[in-house]
Image (tube, rainbow, N blue to C red):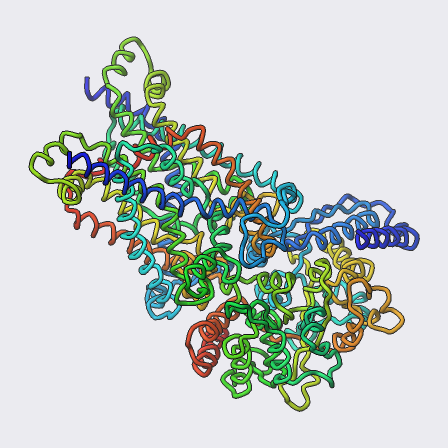
Amino acid sequence: MKKRSISLLLTASMLLTAALTGPVTAYAEEHDPVTLTFWGWTASDFESKAIQNGLDEFQAMYPYITVEYMTVPSADYHTKLKTALASGSGPDVFYLDATQVNDFVSADLILDITDIAADFTATMTDASLQKVSMKGADGETHVYGLDICNVGPVIFYNKDLFEAAGVDPMPTKWDERWTWEEFVENMQKLTVKGDDGSTSQYGTCNWEEGYYLYVLQECLDLNGANWYNEDFTAAQNVDSEESKEVIENIKALRTEYGVAPDPNAAGSDTSNSPTAMFLTGQVASIAIGSYALQEIAQSGLNYGVGLFPTFGREGDEDAFMVSADMKAINKESEHPEEALLLAEYMSSPEFGIPIYQTGLWMPNQKSLYEEENISQWFNEEIYPEEWKDLIPIFLNAKDKPTDKLSHVTSINDAVDEEMQAFYYADQDADTTLQNIENRINEILG
Amino acid sequence: MKAKKLKKDGRWAILFLAPAIIGLAIFTLYPLIESLHISFTEWDLFSPKKFIGVNNYVKFFHDATGLKVFKNTIVFTLVVVPLQLVTTFFLAVALNQKIRGVRFFRGAYFLPTIASMVSISIVWQWLFNTDFGIINYVIKLLGGSAVNWLTNPKTSLWAIIIVSCWKGTGYHMMIFLAGLQSVPSTYYEAAELDGCTGFSRLIRIVLPLIKPTVLYSSITCVINSMQVFDQVMIITGGGPARSSSVMVQYLYENAFDYYKMGYASAIGWIMAIFIFVLSVIQFKAMDNSDFSIE
Amino acid sequence: MSRKLKQRIVKTVSVVILLIGAFIILIPFIWMVSTSFKGIGDVFKYPPKFFGSEIKWQNYPAVFETINFWGMIKNTVIVTIVVAVGQLLTSSMAGFAFSYLEFRGREFLFRFFLFAIMIPFHVMLIPTFVIMRNLKLLNSLWALILPCIISPLSIFMMRQSFLSVPRSLGEAAAIDGCTPFGIWWRIFLPLSKPTLATLAIFSFMQTWNDFIRPLIFLNSNKKMTLTLGLYNMIGNFATDWGLMMAAVILSILPVFVFYLALQDFFVEGIALTGLKG
């Protein structure tokens, strides 16, 4: 209730600000009415409402533009989007997952806005963390869309359970991270066996999530395992000792130490089952993308946040990976200018801040990471105090490899299939990694 | 007279058949030919088709994942069909007596049939939950240890098999029941006079009499099993490690996730050919002259 | 005496088997209802209890608030009704032509329709998708309706049913000046009501429960049918099993009511299709 009234207040105040300062007058001149279609994936109730509010505000700023917002189920979003674009019935503006950008660019479905938005993109690229939407296709930088958010891998933990087990809070400073061994030790303290020998509380979960998400890629990078060549056209060194160490450590959490539960829906993309176990206090911690903060915050759990443990590699300061979603414009759009206005608006702090405040996204604008601006979005009811330590880490993060690859859907399915054979059947680590390398190269080649 | 009637009827026939013929031409005949065509090409739905001969078909039998889903589909069919037919036959025999509550039993057994596979699958996904599902709860009550049904490659396909058998029980039981009821009671009496009773009567007298029903049941059961999809998509997504993945799912993924339309079409045709072969085998095995669809 | 005893034993054993079977069949439904009244805290409790700490009936209204349930029902009903009416009309017309009318090529054409029954739908999936794309019917309910209106199996069953109507009835009407259309509409159709009801029921069940077509042809949340909506719920609300179960129950309810109302037709219909199909 409290949260809702706060957000209402914020929205109201923002509407007011927009009304006072917004460029309403500039666009009051004669315009033919324009209808734009905008596609986004089905989001949480909260996110959908935030988006709708933002769109309402946009339409108030530009009364001649009507935006039709269509949500498409997330599981099939990119498939449906690609088909719609290719058959000429696509939306003018759309959300695009970072992993899909390359494929959409090479299928020639996205408007290259480098020139038409020259002024804007110039300032934008300086001011924002622009990562995925810029591609150097021919040696030059092309802008294909505008990023909107910043999401990175973290560990959320249940403070009450940590306290009860006498485990220290998880570190949030890069230099103070636990080693993997310390992490396992602490998770063992948090794992409780019931009278009948079955585990009634687990230390941690979600380490075996799908490849294109966060956990596996982050762990590989922490241990210095790099699977791809420079321009991401081929896989190499997948079967390195570093990779092997990572996947064996992850598997051991469940099979050897018994500190992680059996995930319940290994086949499906959604990592909801681990989240559910964490939210209901069955598991003390969860490794997951920072987007989960929004859902966790709403559950009323006493939660904290921490960084992934180190694998002991020297110089892993650069190993924090983030991903972003972007908005792009249909190449065939009949109203590219208005579409650009909408895309720009959706990258502005006005649109983003209400969503950053829910914890779903970290900001994409560099300025919002500056000391004096943090309070604009750092909602203390949502973000735990120690999150402030993570802010510089998010600011200086790098891209996930899957955001730079082509054919990510096929690669992801192949990697997941092999990894599951390793995690849940008896395929050994070497075979798994060799298979992964071969299959990725087959897909890319 | 006859010729005149033929001509007169012919005009009316065109009228009466027009919707069916047009519909069949557009939505069956054309797609059938076109899909055969696509299966010989490499095509991503966006760029022009490239003819590659039978490569897609050859590829399937060299594709480790393809062979895995093929094997899963065959195992699924070979387990589900006999299991389902035998249990539902005996259930139908039990129900084909003058006992109280026939209506209740009929209604209860038929419930899973009317509900969609999607909704049923959601319920079973919850029942199979390793930590909170009641299936493992019952197993533990009986002294066993929890089975991670959906995350163990050894059990995931069996979870799908259990759901499918459970769902199909009502339908096949009802068909057998209808078959049994069409057997005139004089046959039973005659058999009894010959001293043929109980189980042997069932096998020697009743079963041959309802051969058409058995054949119909087994053929539809094989066709449906070969095309299993909904429950796999929802309960396991084909995982873990494709241990429960099946042909239609692989077809769907190749077509609409990877945009390999040619390969997906070839998978569809391989499936169709297998269904056809299995149907012919069943016809031959039953060697039944009474049964003809005309 | 011993024969009677034996019969009684057989009957008792049968009833016991049937009861066990019914229990196995019904338990998932019972558990579904139980879960639908649980909040998230009660759902994730071990050992599982039939009743949670509170009866959370709010899961039911919550279904209508969290997903576009009325819209899903509306879409499903539209598709189901249009397909059923279309199928009955086209298959009774074609069935009439194949059974009553005499024309050249009848047998050949009929064999062709028989052949069409055997073709698995999935083979035609991609070309059908391409047709819908070219007709700009993707994300339209027409994409679900058009390919399903013609059903070779229904045509076959209507023909079988019409064959049992005495020809003399039609011929007598023809002498009185009745056109084939009149014969079809006034004589054959009224005499085949049970078959029509059966086909309607089957068409209803098939369309209501269809999953792969909506999955492939529909995009937006506004156009979703029930099965597709439930499928998407798994991705978005999988933690809230109480809510999921409430949604499942609400989606089954219309078919269930329909079934109870027409239970005897269902059984008869199964028998009819089972024996002749």
Query: Horizontal placement of A441 versus B66: left or right?
Result: right
Q: Is residue A27 above or below residue A243?
A: above
In the rendered image, residue C63, in percent from the top left (x then y), is placed at 62, 44
Quadrant where the C terminus of chain B is found in the figure: top left
- Is residue C21 in view from this perspective? yes
In the rendered image, residue A56, in percent from the top left (x then y), is placed at 78, 48
In the rendered image, residue C272, in percent from the top left (x then y), is placed at 30, 32
Query: What is the quadrant of residue A408 in the picture?
Result: bottom right
Query: What is the quadrant of residue C262 in the picture?
Result: top left
Residue, far left: B194
Which residue corresponds to the image point at 28% horizontal and 20% vertical from the top-left? Answer: B8
- Is residue B262 in view from this perspective? no
Nearer-the-camera pick, A363 or C141: A363
Nearer-the-camera pick, C148 or A125: C148
Numbered label tally: 0
Q: Is residue A141 above or below residue B10?
A: below
Which residue corresponds to the image point at 37% horizontal and 19% vertical from the top-left? Answer: C185
Residue, far bottom: A314
Q: Is residue A422 above or below residue C2?
A: below
Query: Horizontal placement of B162 versus C77: left or right?
Result: left
Query: Horizontal placement of A112 versus B192: left or right?
Result: right
Nearer-the-camera pick, A210 or A134: A210
Quadrant where the N terminus of chain B is found in the figure: top left
In the rendered image, residue C222, in percent from the top left (x then y), is placed at 62, 44
Query: What is the quadrant of residue B138 in the picture?
Result: bottom left
Residue, far front: C1
Residue, far top: C176
Query: Horizontal placement of B77 versus B236: left or right?
Result: left
Q: Is residue A241 above or below residue B158?
A: below
